[in-house]
Amino acid sequence: WTHSGIASFYTKVAANGYVFLYLTSRAIAQSAMTRDYLKNICQDGEKLPDGPVLMNPDSFYSAFYREVVKKTPHEFKIATLQNIRCLFPNYWNPFYAGFGNRPTDERSYREVGISDGKIFTINPSSELVCSSINKCRKTYTIANMFGLLDQMFPAVAQENGLLEKEDYNEWNYWKSPIQIVSIDDEA
């Protein structure tokens, strides 16, 4: 299913210089149907941004067994994302954020180094739940995300193609946990 407003949101993220990669554990036999589905999503005149669609090269039955019976689609996704990450220098993570609809997607994105604050699970109510390893999750509507878009997905610097230092951007710096100082320590 599609979530109202997601095509416009993804389009605005792409306009800030981000490239989308669509990853599914569906079998390669379902590629035409999956690509057509993604290509034909249109909401208020907005389509999803272009991007490669990576699919499970296994047979339909093997992919189905892994996803539905074993419930381990993350095995394929983690391996695929790690293979892509290996194409880049160790100091550079090509993945900035991850959007999924299952807890296994969250696990996959965390395994390749996407920060918890940039991992989102879209629930059936069309809310984006921001991941957190300590289970303090923040929930946003897609409409809320539009207001935060430029802070969460700052424009990619065009002159050198690099993103700002993630640890010190406005979104992460100001939400750092407050350190607890004991009064006894100061005496």
Image (cartoon, rainbow, N blue to C red):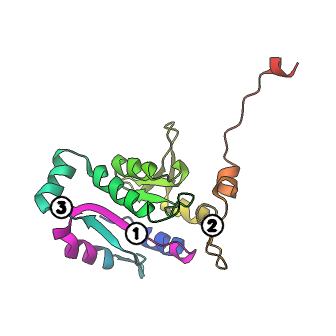
Tell me the SS state at disc 2: loop
Q: Where is residue 77 in the image (x, y as percent from the top left)?
A: 33, 56
Q: Which residues are the magenta region?
A: 14-37
Tell me the SS state at disc 1: loop
Question: For the point 53% across and 51% down, which residue is it?
Answer: 115
Q: Position of residue 46 (x, y in %)?
A: 43, 79
Query: Quadrant of the image for the C terminus?
Result: top right
Q: Residue furthest bottom?
A: 45
- The quadrant holding residue 177 is top right
Q: In this view, does 158 lie to the left or right of 46?
A: right
Residue type at mark 3 is Asp
Residue type at mark 2 is Leu
Q: Which of 176 and 79 is in front in this view?
A: 79
Q: Nearer the viewer, residue 136 or 140?
A: 136
Residue under pointer 2: 163
Q: Do the residues labelled 1 and 3 touch (CB within 8 Å)?
A: no
Q: Position of residue 85 (x, y in %)?
A: 44, 61
Please rate how many residues cluster around mark 3, counting C-alpha atoms within 10 Å: few if below 14, some from 14 to 19, many from 20.
Answer: some
Q: Give whichever of discs 1 and 2 has the lower sequence position.
A: 1
Q: Do the residues labelled 3 and 2 touch (CB within 8 Å)?
A: no
Disc number lying in front (1 or 3):
3
Q: Give whichever of discs 3 and 2 has the lower sequence position.
A: 3
Tell me the SS state at disc 3: loop
Residue type at mark 1 is Leu
Residue under pointer 1: 21
Residue under pointer 3: 58
Question: For the point 72% across and 29% down, which residue is it?
Answer: 180
- The quadrant holding residue 185 is top right
